Image (cartoon, coloured by chain):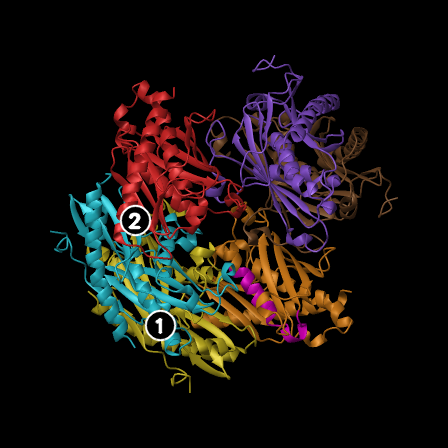
Chain colours: A purple, B red, C cyan, D brown, E orange, F yellow
Amino acid sequence: MRVDGREPMALRRIEFVTPVTKHAEGSCLVKFGDTHVLCTATLEEKVPPFLRGQGSGWVTAEYGMLPRSTHQRMDREAAKGKQSGRTQEIQRLIGRALRSVVDLVQLGERQIKLDCDVLQADGGTRTASICGAYIALAQSLKPLIQQKIIPPSVMKDSIAAISCGIYNDRILVDLSYEEDSAAQVDANFVMTGSGKIVEIQGTAEGNPFAEDQFIQMLAAAREALGEITQMQRMILEGAQ
Amino acid sequence: MRVDGREPMALRRIEFVTPVTKHAEGSCLVKFGDTHVLCTATLEEKVPPFLRGQGSGWVTAEYGMLPRSTHQRMDREAAKGKQSGRTQEIQRLIGRALRSVVDLVQLGERQIKLDCDVLQADGGTRTASICGAYIALAQSLKPLIQQKIIPPSVMKDSIAAISCGIYNDRILVDLSYEEDSAAQVDANFVMTGSGKIVEIQGTAEGNPFAEDQFIQMLAAAREALGEITQMQRMILEGAQ
Amino acid sequence: MRVDGREPMALRRIEFVTPVTKHAEGSCLVKFGDTHVLCTATLEEKVPPFLRGQGSGWVTAEYGMLPRSTHQRMDREAAKGKQSGRTQEIQRLIGRALRSVVDLVQLGERQIKLDCDVLQADGGTRTASICGAYIALAQSLKPLIQQKIIPPSVMKDSIAAISCGIYNDRILVDLSYEEDSAAQVDANFVMTGSGKIVEIQGTAEGNPFAEDQFIQMLAAAREALGEITQMQRMILEGAQ
Amino acid sequence: MRVDGREPMALRRIEFVTPVTKHAEGSCLVKFGDTHVLCTATLEEKVPPFLRGQGSGWVTAEYGMLPRSTHQRMDREAAKGKQSGRTQEIQRLIGRALRSVVDLVQLGERQIKLDCDVLQADGGTRTASICGAYIALAQSLKPLIQQKIIPPSVMKDSIAAISCGIYNDRILVDLSYEEDSAAQVDANFVMTGSGKIVEIQGTAEGNPFAEDQFIQMLAAAREALGEITQMQRMILEGAQ
Amino acid sequence: MRVDGREPMALRRIEFVTPVTKHAEGSCLVKFGDTHVLCTATLEEKVPPFLRGQGSGWVTAEYGMLPRSTHQRMDREAAKGKQSGRTQEIQRLIGRALRSVVDLVQLGERQIKLDCDVLQADGGTRTASICGAYIALAQSLKPLIQQKIIPPSVMKDSIAAISCGIYNDRILVDLSYEEDSAAQVDANFVMTGSGKIVEIQGTAEGNPFAEDQFIQMLAAAREALGEITQMQRMILEGAQ
Amino acid sequence: MRVDGREPMALRRIEFVTPVTKHAEGSCLVKFGDTHVLCTATLEEKVPPFLRGQGSGWVTAEYGMLPRSTHQRMDREAAKGKQSGRTQEIQRLIGRALRSVVDLVQLGERQIKLDCDVLQADGGTRTASICGAYIALAQSLKPLIQQKIIPPSVMKDSIAAISCGIYNDRILVDLSYEEDSAAQVDANFVMTGSGKIVEIQGTAEGNPFAEDQFIQMLAAAREALGEITQMQRMILEGAQ
């Protein structure tokens, strides 16, 4: 049994609150247990320079952690004057994930900027960010779809992500910070609502792992992502 | 009457929620209407280099705005690689304000870092930050006071801050963003619970103002700060 | 009596030398005792991007200290790669102060950049900078006014600034560095020649102060600023 | 058939030249077709601060591309003043990969810094870097092993990496830049000589992919990595 | 006799390999003994902003050292976030030297960027860079000259550079790193193929030197540069 | 005849004012015509890390230009966040020049930092800086020499610098900005009071020059430097 009493394949308590801020076109506070991420979507009627005049839109993401979102306070990246390699890696991942479910041509010359800011961290901030950013993104497009400025098919699919790990040779899903620190293998899976793979990242710094372990993690992730996809669907249907 | 129907001297609805995060030694989510600031206090058992070995503690503050806390999305300071002049001015103000009510010698060789992160902005973020940071700071010291590691007199007083302005020649208290943008004069008052002045800032970019207008703003601020001080007292007494 | 024998309300010996440099459109070396600041005004026939095509001009300021203008050598900001929070705070103050007396619409699509560089520091560098920058600014506009390109009313008023402090419960005006370091309260007042207030900043890090002390400082500042205004007027009339 | 006439599962011509520089403790110029990376290993008798006094060593990596290693010249990162997110992502990957095959405790308080500099790029620079850095790393440890300062078991395994992709629904191995740009899916596999997985990264920005496609890529990578492992073994045996 | 057995006036073994990279318009790997520099020329059909619309082209250079090109590993400038003063000084020198032999008006609105990256360093990297960059530059222009887009006279002359020094009161030419470190005087001479002087730099940090010693170094440099000019000519004639 | 009526070999009016600031251990305002540089020497009782515990001192220099010291206002380097290549080149030159006349072992574990700040520029700021920094440096050491803490021989020689150029095939000495801009060749000579050469820099971007022209410039510089050396000697003898 796990630290918090969960079964190996059980997700933490997940919550999506939308909208949560007054100014953003779309917003979602996503909680996976004690991991809380505030996601906002900003819709701009222009694209970055490299896309101008090409009839295509863009989706990009930025990620940050509040200095005391973590057990130990981290230095503020704005004060240090640069974003860490980890921050950049995560925001690139979130951006790629969200772009995979948006039809950029149907979006037209618009850009959606997703800001994922971790208010409290307890493992799995990048996967929670993807899950919440999807809600914020979908919300930001609703008015344009309702006004028939862009077709509903601009959202090609939904997207969600989850972490898996191997601890004492058992596969665990949705690891907390404590589990993550102790796990031999750390993997993240990003899949669409229809079950296709968008991104797979598996890393074993200390102990390389066998192929069948990886296949088991993939299966576990697929099941967990099915549950999250259901929740996302309900939230979006329920939200005004 | 004001945009939101308030009387000129009326404060917006104020809320202090404490604690609000799992990891910080003290934390407070403070709301002045639609302005929401998450304040955390991190207590460290060491002081910055310039104070080492001098038997005195330190209190400092950092301030940030989430990119989409504002009407228009602002560029992320961590991505730009530097904090704006405005950010630095505000965090220096918050730090000075809080230091004025802490007995640094009684604090001993400890440092308290206050992080004030604006989740949603609608005017008055710097004054709300001071009000909320005071709660977070007081909370972070409670265990040490209870364990008699430091005496209760380490908190010399409470501290609060409020903005005033002049609009159409009328004095307004606790301005929203819309009022702030239109006001001829923008002033911030920081006072202790016992009514002493810690900081006064009055600025009139467009139209210089007369001395008696300033005196009226000072009186209005004093009254508003009395109310806020009451709320802070109740919150700290109520909080565990 | 004060360190240098002055009465509490007495200003240090003040000197304005204009012009002092060959290239700038306006320039002034201002001395308040041992505080010496070289102020230059650069007039450009274009405005920053946010003002383009709006028929309005702009006034901005930059501030710097030579590394050995101070008792202890300070690191050069250009070498450190960034301006300190204090530097940014001061240059924002100088810019706001000067903008308050210029009719930006009458100025037309022009920008005046004021550079205030401290050659020698002994307290009060920001207030001296404002006093000297006003002279440099006025000088830079003279030729345009004489050629009737812009009307004389572009200068709405004159502007000056002075520091006050409380030391041993006495109000002192125009503090030297030594007095400033020992003072309980540090305040800066920026007023127009006609006696209106443009900016008030009062700070008490160690000991909060009472309202009547603040009112006394305001009165003292008003008197001192009257003297400085007289000197500025004479200098500008005398200068070619 | 592929652009350069290769079979889908065929590797490009691979070459390892070691040693190639006079000063480094270990060095290898690795070529995968037109992708050429110069890898050096620097052995230092001290560890980074976070490891001091813990009896463990460290392995880290840095990655760079010469400005004109690419089709279009890229701006020099040293001139821009920062490393891109991509650069940081790659050097973190290389570091993790190499650490996975070194017994850091047997290494003792030593650090090995691997520099992978791309002289010419034609796809697969990160996987080539890992293959070449392994040779450089192994070479740098040989003298210490020969002098019995550290045991041969410090190298727990060998390590290699390869890219796979899906193009027109066919699995391709070891993609050139042109193939990489056109591929629907881009995946990188890092495995040990004994066939364990160290890192898997699969990304589908445009078109999410099915699980069985991923399994096929994994099998293809495994075969290719077997070949590279053979070459690495021969090179290390042949090198003095 | 010198460390490597050379006569005082003897050059190290010099090699020019061109072309050496697939993508650059011109490229040359230049070797002076153990000093190896990879020079590439990138030809762009646009000029920097300060030259736009003036009918003139531009030639500029950038210089870098691989971290382990040196005896001790140097920190990577891209990681440190800035180029050292030495790097900037050298790349400015290379740029000036190459511009002196190109007719910028005949070049037309084109820019040539020369990248000189030191793969292995053993003294004289800046002079070797100039010699190799000349080859890369000349190669990059050949196709345009052959297609009669620009006249052959765009290359006004050839250019080469060499170091001289004084060691134990003897003049040495083409110093290795070891000699350079021990020399009392360090001088670099840049001359055209026709024997005109483009740049002279002589520095004596420890021991100022006499005029006649300088004149002797100048004569020695002239002779050495004659040899290098011959080699450059042969290489360019031989290269396709 | 020259723009300002000078003979080709004539220096501009030169002035050395010392001391000129209250805080620095040594200071000198040096004027070469309209070029005015404020030089200060800061004496510190510690050396940079690379020299600690080696019984040797250090001399270093920093250089800056006030933004409006020039015809067109230049951006402030502190605001841009970095020093230009030109600035770094000049401050390295000043540092080398001054170190060449100080016996660093006799100086002991002390560091002298020379700050050369250009108040007004009209050509020759780097050479004027060297001339003035020498005076500031010498002044800063006088008290230690008088108190016999260090021997007078710590100053091995005096140092001065001058620019020469070729304009219309005539050699000119001490070029103004206008002359400098039009000159075909720009050279700087740094020599000791006893006539030894410390640094020679000759650059011909547009038109390479002949050896005999260089020899003539060297002779002209030698004569001019003799005059400056005389002035420096008189100033130092006259100064208290």
Residue E96 spot, x, y in % from top left: 56, 68
Local crowd size for mark 2, using a 10 Å CA cut-off: few (<14), some (14–19), many (≥20):
some
- Left or right: residue C50 versus residue C158 is right
The amino acid sitting under disc 1 is Pro
Tell me where the magenta segment starts and ends, as one range. E89-109
Image quadrant where residue C92 sits: bottom left
Q: Which numbered mark, 2 or 1, is in the foreground of this view?
A: 1
Work out which quarter of the rendered image holds the N terminus of chain F and state it. Answer: bottom left
Q: Secondary structure at mark 1?
A: helix
Q: Nearer the viewer, residue B99 or B130?
A: B130
Residue that protrudes farthest toward the bottom in the picture? F1
> Residue shown at 45%/46% (left/top)?
B178
Q: CA distance from mark 2 to mark 1?
A: 31 Å
Q: Mark 1 = which residue?
A: C152
Q: Mark 2 = which residue?
A: C201
Q: Secondary structure at mark 2?
A: strand
Res D159 visible = yes
Res C179 visible = no
Residue E108 spot, x, y in % from top left: 67, 72
- Left or right: residue B69 versus residue C43 is right
Residue that protrudes farthest toward the front in the picture? B1
The amino acid sitting under disc 2 is Gln
Q: Nearer the viewer, residue F77 or C187?
A: C187
